[in-house]
Image (spheres, rainbow, N blue to C red):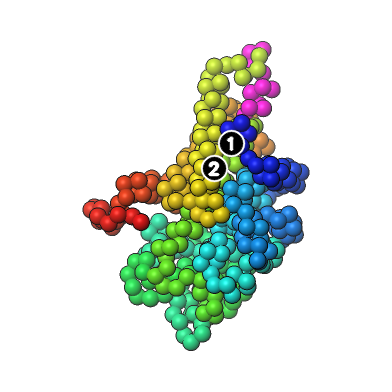
Amino acid sequence: MDSLIKLTDEQAALREVARQVATARYAPRAREWDDAASPLPHDERRRLADLGFLGLTLPEAYGGHDRPLLDALIVLEELAKASPVAAWPVFEANAGPARVVHLFGTEEQKARLLPPIIAGEATLAVSISEPDAGTAATDMTTRGRIEGDEVVVNGVKRWCSGAGHSEQYLVYLRLSDAPGARGIGAVVIDAATPGVTFGPQERLMGFRGIMSADIMFDEVRVPVANLIVPAGGFGKLFTAFSIERLGNATMSLAIGQTALDRSAAYVRERRQFGRPIAEFQMVQSMLAEMVMKVQGARMLLYAAANEAGVGAPSALSASVAKCNANEMAKSVSDHAIQIHGGYGYSAEYELERLHRDSHGWALAGGTINIQRMRIASEYLGLRFNQRSSEPEPAVLS
């Protein structure tokens, strides 16, 4: 890995700190958190803040570090290789909804909302999907009506990662009767606001410890000052989605790299027919395929992150990196299970956890099939309307 992509001395030092913390503190607890589906304890979140990991890409004016996106992804990968639960607050702060506040919030909103996130005192989760609006996000029906200096919210949200555990939620909702994306905006809602309730925690195939539940809003009143994106601003949020997709790709990369590392160690040690299984051609072929896929995913991810700098990558680069990394993680973790044989099927070796989580990242943040459509759209410069069979002639900006 190190010979493929040259990091700066500062990036290498940052990675080493993250690696030491992850290995010593979080790797030993990964199975415990997965078995119990336990969220990261608050004191561990504050520890991540003390290390500076929750403000890597956020402005110095609010306690952050103004670092490039790649720096945050380097830290995110090291933590995720140990435990996705430990990595989750870093993901949310540096590549998730906090970046929406950073990019589109007013100075007052940033000064009020970002410091608690950077300090580990609060987590801001994102809430977009609904029971009948997943991939077709513009079908959402959760509404907000403005009454004086308040936004009154009603509706139901689904698949909200962090629901019932995070202190705040960036809720996407319909703010006008304009059709499609033109009526959609986003508002920050505190979990303790009257009228906010949570459904039972979902029991998911993977992502155990990354809480997920429905959120219900019944005449929930929040200040207009919490309106981050007004009606009609949904389109520009694709900038934030591109950043989030690189965070998603990094979580997939961590799965692939971990599966590869464990498999490489195993084939040297495991003996059958009187010799290490690394000497068998079938094992060599599988391992070589894993190496190619992991290194390819890393190069695509790093290229997109370098393109982003302190901002966002292009939609094309982000979708290519995410789609490739998602597919890689599923394939490489599956190969790792096969290489380990019966041990790969045992929870003790944690490969089954990696494989379960790999499918989650391939669904979150836009499925693999949606990314493929996005890639074709961006590459051809055409916007395809999924509600009809004819492509729109307009060229994408």
Residue position for label 1: 5
The residue at the point 52 percent across, 38 percent down is 299
At a point 73% along the width and 54% down the height, the residue shown is: 51
Outermost left residue: 390
Q: Position of residue 277 (x, y in %)?
A: 62, 19
Contact? badges 1 and 2 (CB < 8 Å): yes
- Asked if the stretch drawn in magenta spans residue 269, the answer is yes
User: Is residue 391 shown above or below 346?
Assistant: below
Task: Tell me if residue 188 comes above or below residue 382 in the rendering.
Answer: below
Residue 11 shown left or right of residue 69 in the figure: right
The quadrant holding residue 94 is bottom right
Residue drawn at 43 percent across, 63 percent down:
236
**Residue span colored magenta:** 263-274
Q: Residue at x 62, y 45 (%)?
A: 74
> From mark 1 to mark 2, how far is it between C-alphas?
8 Å
Q: Is residue 234 magenta?
A: no
Q: Which residue is mark 2?
A: 302
Is residue 213 shown above or below 33? below
User: Dot 1: few (<14), some (14–19), or many (≥20) neighbours within 10 Å?
Assistant: few
Tag 1's secondary structure? loop
